[in-house]
Image (spheres, rainbow, N blue to C red):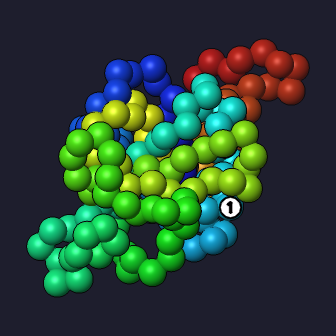
Amino acid sequence: EYIGDSQLIPPTTWADQQARAVARGGYLATITSEAENRFISTAVGIGSLGGCKCVWLGGFQNHSSPTYSEPSGGWEWVTGETWSYTHWAPGEPHNSGHGSTEDFLTVWFSSDPGNVSWNDHPDFGSGRYLIEWNSNPIPEPNTALLLGFGLVGLGVKRRGQRGTSHSGDRRVS
């Protein structure tokens, strides 16, 4: 499950946004397949982000990784999932721009939902991020709990009926 956080917060760092996601019980979203990328592009899309085009995802370039090289090596997901699917914009990752290294993943939205692509970005600049949860962050009552409440309610109702005469008058014991 994904949710786009559309709070109006000032642009901040990738690390700050990952900490916010964790504080909410999730993590910055990972996209490990074309189906997930399509889902993000259609379900979230630029319209739901108030026109914001650059949104943090849970990918980062690990300089300690044995596969690290600039600009395209050592990319990992915050979850530890395998980094195998990518959807880089043409010419990305390029590690150039903003006068610093670009070690963090953003997704770029456009008005065309089919044209959602990835960009390597320095650790500053976007105030938007996507949170992913492994389960629903709002606990849903399970069936056994609902059944239990139903049985308790039924028992209370039946007990109240036993203390009532057919004429509707309360019996006094």
Residue 51 spot, x, y in % from top left: 61, 28
Residue 143 spot, x, y in % from top left: 61, 58
Residue 61 spot, x, y in % from top left: 26, 64
Name the residue: 27% across, 57% down.
103
Residue 79 seen: no
Count the marks: how many?
1
Name the residue: 21% across, 76% down.
68
Question: In the picture provided, is 84 more to the left or to the right than 109?
Answer: left
Q: Quadrant of the N terminus?
A: bottom right
Circle 1 sits in a helix, a strand or a loop, which is it? helix
* Residue in front for this viewpoint, 59 or 156: 59
Name the residue: 32% across, 52% down.
96
Name the residue: 45% across, 81% down.
84
Residue found at the very far bottom of the displayed protein: 66
Residue 39 drawn above or below residue 108? below
Q: Quadrant of the C terminus?
A: top right
Residue 47 seen: yes
For the residue carrying disc 1, how many other residues have a C-alpha within 10 Å: few (<14), some (14-19), or many (20+)? some
Residue 77 drawn above or below residue 114? below
* Residue in front for this viewpoint, 111 or 164: 111
Q: In which quarter of the view is residue 167 placed?
A: top right
Residue found at the very far left of the displayed protein: 64
Q: Disc 1 marks which amino acid?
A: Arg
Residue 144 spot, x, y in % from top left: 56, 59
Residue position marked by numbered label 1 in the rendering: 38
Question: In the picture provided, is 117 more to the left or to the right than 157?
Answer: left
Residue found at the very far top of the displayed protein: 169
* Residue in front for this viewpoint, 71 or 63: 71
Q: In which quarter of the view is residue 98 placed?
A: top left
